[in-house]
Amino acid sequence: MKRRKKALRACAAILALALLLAGCAAQTAGEQPPASAPIEAPTESAQQTETAGREPVQTTLRLLVVDGAETGRLVLAGENAYEFFALHTENVPVSLDGAPADASALEDGMTVEITYSGDITASQPAELIGAESVSAWSRGTAQNPGGTTYDLCGLYLQVLEDLWARDEGLNHGAKYVSVDLSAAPGELSSAAKYAVAWVFADRHGALPLTLTYDELLSQGYLTGAAPEDADRYAVEWEDGLLFRITADEWADGEHYSLPVVKFSAEKWRSPLGAYGFSRCTALWSQMGSWGGYNVGGEFIA
């Protein structure tokens, strides 16, 4: 009898131990984290879903059309240095004097108002995202009076292109193009000056700068002399070209009662590698744009 009780007690102890071990095993198994799923980048539809509920911030900018009216890809500049933008006019409603119009009504030199979502890309120039409208006005209206600097950017771009075509050997291997308009006639904003440099450099596959000779020298672009060296005849720009447009003795005046701008222009790579136009005269036709310019003389070094 005693043996039977001892046996029963032993069986009970073994059973209890087995249950205890099973419970611990189950608890330990339950604490193990599940296998990690691969992390995937959000899909385009997921990104659209995330932004679908966000209220867009509508923004209106007043900008100058520096270039691109004929192609439909506007290069735009504001008054502030950071206001340098681009906009494709395809599928964007355009109005002229408050009435619906085609994008062909836009002109280089116009000041336009663009309403968009408030977002921009990180590119250069920054693309305006979600453009809703482009509003323009005819020349001679209060919003677009024209004036003697109308499309001055277009005039300067033509001068730069003409200089590029002269003594083309100087252009070879130019990685940088610096356009110095700091002493040019007109009151272009810093953003408009940079936009001119960007358009011109982009046409020729170069990187744009708006540095003066002294700035290029101090920042190490020019070689052959230290920045403090007074002997500038040994200095050259191995991988770049400097273009300068400067006002002559007087920047503007009149010719047969029509406004005229007087300037000189030069491209420079070294003291023995330069080409320039002197005593240039551009006559404003009172039709809102410049009809070209005359060159008084040319020089080469």
Image (cartoon, grey):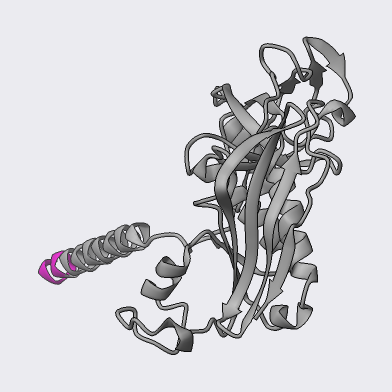
Tell me, yes or no, whether the highlighted magenta stretch contains residue 17: no
**Quadrant of the rendered structure where residue 59 is?**
top right
Predominant secondary structure, magenta span: helix
**Residue in front for this viewpoint, 198 or 61:** 198
- What residue is rendered at 73% in x and 68% in y? 298
How far across and down, in percent of the image, does residue 69 sit? 81, 38
Comparing 56 with 165, the one in front is 165
Q: Residue lying furthest front in this view? A: 256
User: In the image, is residue 5 part of the stretch drawn in magenta?
Assistant: yes
Q: Is residue 263 above or below residue 111?
A: below
Percent from the top left, x then y, of residue 239? 59, 81
Quadrant for residue 173, please give it.
bottom right
User: Which residue is at 72% across, 52% downward?
Assistant: 157
* Quadrant of the frame with the C terminus: bottom right
Q: Which residues are magenta?
A: 1-6
- Residue 223 x/y as whole percent: 46, 86
Asked if residue 122 can be seen in this view, the reply is: no
Residue found at the far left of this picture: 2
Picture coordinates of residue 46, whole percent (x, y): 63, 42
